[in-house]
Image (spheres, grey):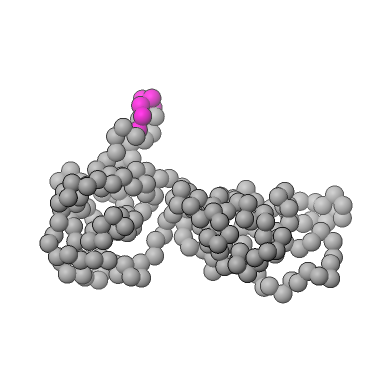
Amino acid sequence: MERRGLVAGPDFEYFRRRYFTPAEVAQHNRPEDLWVSYLGCVYNLTPLAQEYKGNLLLKPIVEVAGQDISHWFDPKTRDIRKHIDPLTGCLRYRTPRGRFVHVPPQLPRSDWANDFGKPWWKESQYEVGRLSAKTRNICIVNTLTSQEHVLEVGALESMWEILHRYLPYNAHAASYTWKYEGKNLNMNCTLEENGIRDEEEEFDYLNMDSTLHTPAVLLYFNDDLTEL
């Protein structure tokens, strides 16, 4: 484990988040910043959009920028869903929005180049992380400044990943001791593993608004001014 002053933790210069929330993916909804999610993973298709800029085959992908497109895929094969083409009687990709990049044409054509290698949906280079299947809110309270921030985080994120989310609000976040109900949190564990239960289902069962209660993590300054 790397150490920065009094604080032990990962090197955030090279830190890579594992999880992204649907709300985060939805922010990347333009051709110049295009993300999608499917089958539990998140993909940055911006390089693909730049490569095929102006091509009509990019249009169906741009239309779903920032969205989950798992329904495009067969979860068993992780390939685009297929069907029997009524015109040719052949098995081909099912594209209700219209044919898109790397999908072959319905009939043979001399102007379609198939020398691109793997289709984009089979390329791991576009993957940036996993999609959080379950998210929850957590309130982070800086006891030094009395500032409070509510973050939406993935249920499987470690405290280090949550700290990374919090950095825009406090660049010295790693210089604080993170506590819940007076106990130091294990930064390598999730909120649930640290005893911070997600009570949303219980609130729903009782027909209560779960947003009325958000667990609070308290940050206590360690006096070393570490900046990430």
Tell me the chief SS of the magenta region: loop
Q: Residue at x 18, y 57 (%)?
A: 176
Taking the view exactly as shown, the residue that stands out farthest to the left is: 223
Quadrant showing the C terminus: bottom left
Q: Quadrant of residue 117?
A: bottom right
Residue 119: x and y in percent read 66, 66
Depth check, front residue: 52 or 140: 52
**Magenta stretch bounds:** 205-210
Res. 55 image quadrant: bottom right
Q: Is residue 36 visible?
A: no
Residue furthest bottom in the image: 115
| Residue 174 coordinates in the image, percent (x, y) | 23, 61
Residue 208 painted magenta: yes
Task: Say which quarter of the image contains residue 197.
Answer: top left
* 14 falls in the magenta region: no
Residue at x 73% of width, y 53% of height: 98
